[in-house]
Image (cartoon, grey):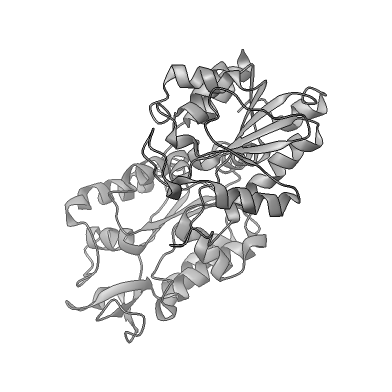
Amino acid sequence: MNVIRLADLIAQGRVAGKRVFIRADLNVPQDAGGRITEDTRIRASVPCIRMALDAGAAVMVTSHLGRPTEGEFKPADTLAPVAARLSELLGREVPLVADWVDGVAVAPGQVVLLENCRVNKGEKKNDPVLARKLAALCDIFVHDAFGTAHRAEASTYGIAQYAPIACAGPLLAAEIDAVTKALANPKRPLIAIVAGSKVSTKLTILQSLATQVDGLIVGGGIANTFMLAAGLPIGNSLAEPDLLDQARSVIASMQARGAAVPIPTDVVVAKAFKADAPATVKAAAEVAADDLILDIGPQTAATLAAQLKSAGTIVWNGPVGVFEFDAFAHGTETIARAIAASPAFSIAGGGDTLAAIAKYGIEGDIGYISTGGGAFLEVLEGKTLPAFRILAQRAAD
């Protein structure tokens, strides 16, 4: 995908003295007292900000935080904690600016954080009047928030339409490159792992991947539905019986291409969904009526691990069991360590997936860890994200 990149503009000497507007993703979790509990997204935004500052730009950064009501700013909506953390990370004060839509005072070499952009009226519906105002604030718009790339809002899409120059920041550019490498031009075999509680939330992703991957591993509640579709008992396990035909269709689509959806041969079950519930390994055909399937079994995990180690490309979204409970974490750990050990290019995304990666300390062994949740899923679904589309259009102008 051809887009203008901030790094290219800097290399061409086109950023010094310019007003640069960066749309970052600083939507971090906070506790009841407003203290940031996890700052990965803030740290991920720092390289783009530093690049612009080092190039001599006047830098404005904004983000959404939470789900504010447009036009009704509340103390809980403030980016003040983010400004404080950014100041620490950058080693300089980052002033927080409110009521900024009609003008921002910032000089070359300075950076300011613009208050929660989702409070602006017209943001979510990409109001063209608001979008033009945002574009008028800058010479260069930089989209560096992959987590919002699937939303066509004023600060993510409209501003890119009207700004003099619209480009991708290093974080977004890396996402574009990783997605292209994994899905557009993959080294084969291409194996996808799609796990989660419900088939319904990922059905279109499964259907799309079934037309392009060489192996489709399903896990969690999704695997239960596929087991049921294959005629296996699942007891009291989470599943969606009304989607059995769709599951069978995905299996058939894979088989028609000489590929497969591996169905678990053994599982780990319990009688209750509790961390201290006794765990029992059973053959998939021997699940009792009162059993809950909470993980894949060791035989299944070993088979899938062997498949992953011989892959050319791996796409991973979702743990294959209730990995938060140690008794039901073996399957996810085995899969995670197999991906880490595989020579394949791997791309992983989704909140639970990132939590599993962190739990097993394999961050350095994954080819690319995506920062987007919904955006990552839409890419897997085969959609062209609005942010990618508008940046490509602007690059072609």
Most foreground residue, 311 or 78: 78
- From this viewpoint, is residue 18 visible? yes
Question: Where is the C terminus found, in terms of image quarters?
Answer: top right
Front one among 333 and 160? 160
Q: Which residue is located at x 44 percent, y 58 percent?
A: 318
Which residue: 67% across, 23% down?
A: 140
Of residues 64 and 234, the one drawn nearer to the viewer in this rendering: 64
| Count of numbered circles in the view | 0
* Residue 177 drawn at (x, y percent): 63, 38
Point out residue 297 in the picture as x, y percentages from the top left corner: 39, 75
Q: Nearer the viewer, residue 285 or 238?
A: 238
- Is 192 situated above or below 38? above
**On the picture, is 268 further left or further right than 42?**
left
Horizontally, residue 339 falls left or right of residue 289, namely right
Tell me: residue 311, above or below residue 294.
Answer: above
Name the residue at the top extreme: 397
The residue under the point 54% across, 59% down is 36
In the rendered view, does 114 fall on the left or right side of 58? left
Question: Dividing the image into 4 quarters, which one contains the N terminus?
Answer: top right
Q: Quadrant of residue 198?
A: bottom left
Residue 324 locus on image (x, y percent):
43, 72
* Residue 147, placed above or below residue 39: above
Residue 306 visible to an observer of this rendering? no
320 with respect to 93 (left or right): left
